[in-house]
Amino acid sequence: MPEPVVALPTYEDLCRYIRQTLCEQDALDYDQTPFFQTPIHRRGRAWGVLFHVVGPRELKTSAVWAEPEGRVVFYNSMGQRTREVQLQEAPANGVISRAA
């Protein structure tokens, strides 16, 4: 099955989409669920961002934005890949530092 393709031109759009998708995955309230972002570095260079939400009983689901590959991969609380989307339009290079 082909990967869905989405256009998320700003970092705020990307964060909102990821948070909404993670919350929907476990039926969590978007406004009440803590949302975290951690930059990922590879060979000393910014490469992407790890996002996660924490629900009741320490339920944690996550997503990784791989900036060079232009994709976002979603994982459930057991670490299993649940979804992958390709970004037709993504935030400009250099925005990863905003995740810190």
Image (cartoon, rainbow, N blue to C red):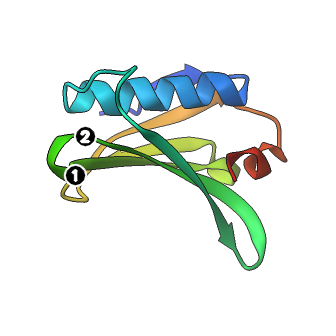
Q: Nearer the viewer, residue 28 or 81?
A: 28
The amino acid on which the numbered mark 1 sits, given as a three-letter code, is: Glu
How many residues crowd mark 1 within 10 Å: few (<14), some (14–19), many (20+)?
few
Location of mark 1 (residue): 58
Q: Nearer the viewer, residue 73 or 34?
A: 34
Residue 34 image point, x, y percent: 41, 37
Which residue is at 21% across, 48% downward?
A: 59
The reply, left or right, for residue 3 in relation to residue 71 is: left
State which quadrant residue 25 falls in.
Answer: top left
Name of the residue lying farthest toward the left: 57
The reply, left or right, for residue 91 in relation to residue 50 is: right
Which residue is at 47% across, 32% downward?
A: 18
The reply, left or right, for residue 15 in relation to residue 75 is: right
Circle 2 — which element?
Answer: loop
Task: Say if residue 58 shows up in the picture.
Answer: yes
Circle 1 — which element?
Answer: helix
Which residue is at 23% across, 56% downward?
A: 80
Location of mark 2 (residue): 55
Which residue is at 74% across, 49% downward?
A: 96
How many residues crowd mark 2 within 10 Å: few (<14), some (14–19), many (20+)?
some
